[in-house]
Amino acid sequence: MLMKASRRPEMPRLDRKADILLAAEKLFAQSGYHAVSIRDIAQEAGVPLALVGYHYGPKHELFHAIFAHWNSTIEERLRELKNAHTLPRIIDAFVGPVLRMRASPEGEYYALLVARELFHVHDESDRVLRDFFDPLAHAFIDALNVALPYATRGQIAWGYQFALGALLHHISDDRIARLSKGQSAPNDPAAALLLTRFIVGGLRAAMPVPKPPLKPTIPISKRSLKTKEREKP
């Protein structure tokens, strides 16, 4: 009697893994890390609850996986930074890849997630900052220190933080249409150049080139003047 072959377990579809990641990114961006459960993510992705854990493990690992997925944007910024030797080019490398990433629907969720979650202190956000964003920050601060050699590293670090604040606000706040009375929109291409000029101008204004010290003038005494008068022919 022939034995019936046992049926192999069906392999999970690869796109389900991507669906889970996108669902987590969207929900974390909209509601915050602590307000979202694994069950919420499974429902948003349309997958069984167990499949989330199968692919990503616990929630904090799924949160970390989102940033690992987007690490290509960090790598792109670092590649552009290697060829940037002036302040405007450094800021182009800092801003450009982020704005291009944000232009996609998935990238928009990620941009909102970064702006919302990484500056609310909790263990998961601190781990992401240390693993992905601190090395990026150090690389840009090093480059800025070369472009602005008369500034201290402390001043440059503050300048980097201010530049980061401007970038994050730009990618997360969509009030521009209302504030500009319809003359601009969140994805206005002209805003990219304006943002770069704003950051460059701000850094230069905050850390200007020191003026050379004035040469000391030697006071001329009355006696010296009388001597010079006598010496005249």
Image: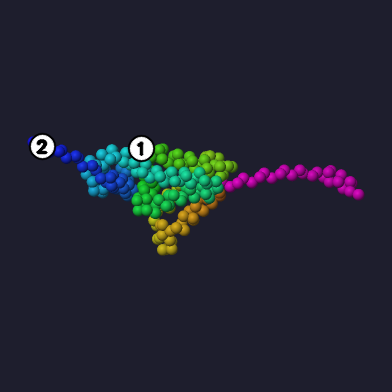
Most foreground residue, 69 or 152: 69
- Residue mark closest to the camera, 1 vs 2: 2
- Residue that carries the numbered disc 2 in the rendered image: 2
User: Judging from the image, what secondary structure is the residue with disc 2 in?
Assistant: loop
Taking the image as shown, residue 128 lies to the left or right of residue 2, namely right
Identify the residue at image location x=38%, y=49%.
111
Most foreground residue, 62 or 158: 62
Most foreground residue, 185 or 136: 136
- Residue 185: name its quadrant: bottom left
Please say whether residue 190 is visible from this viewpoint: yes
- Residue that carries the numbered disc 1 in the rendered image: 123
In the image, is residue 69 part of the stretch drawn in magenta? Answer: no
- For the N terminus, the image quarter is top left
Magenta residue span:
206-233
- Residue 199, given in percent of the width and then of the height, sits at 50, 50
- Residue 7, given in percent of the width and then of the height, sits at 16, 40
Taking the image as shown, residue 216 lies to the left or right of residue 134, namely right
Q: Which mark is residue 218?
A: none
Measure the alpha-carbon separation of dots 1 and 2.
57 Å
In the image, is residue 216 part of the stretch drawn in magenta? Answer: yes
Identify the residue at image location x=59%, y=42%.
150
- Residue 141, given in percent of the width and then of the height, sits at 50, 42
User: Judging from the image, what secondary structure is the residue with disc 1 in?
Assistant: helix
Identify the residue at image location x=52%, y=40%.
142
Q: Which amino acid does the dot numbered 1 rest on?
A: Asp
Mark 1 vs mark 2: which is more N-terminal?
Answer: 2
- Residue 3, given in percent of the width and then of the height, sits at 11, 36
The color scheme shown is: rainbow
- Number of other residues with Cα within 10 Å of mark 1, as a class: few under 14, some 14 to 19, many 20 or more: few
Q: Which amino acid does the dot numbered 2 rest on?
A: Leu
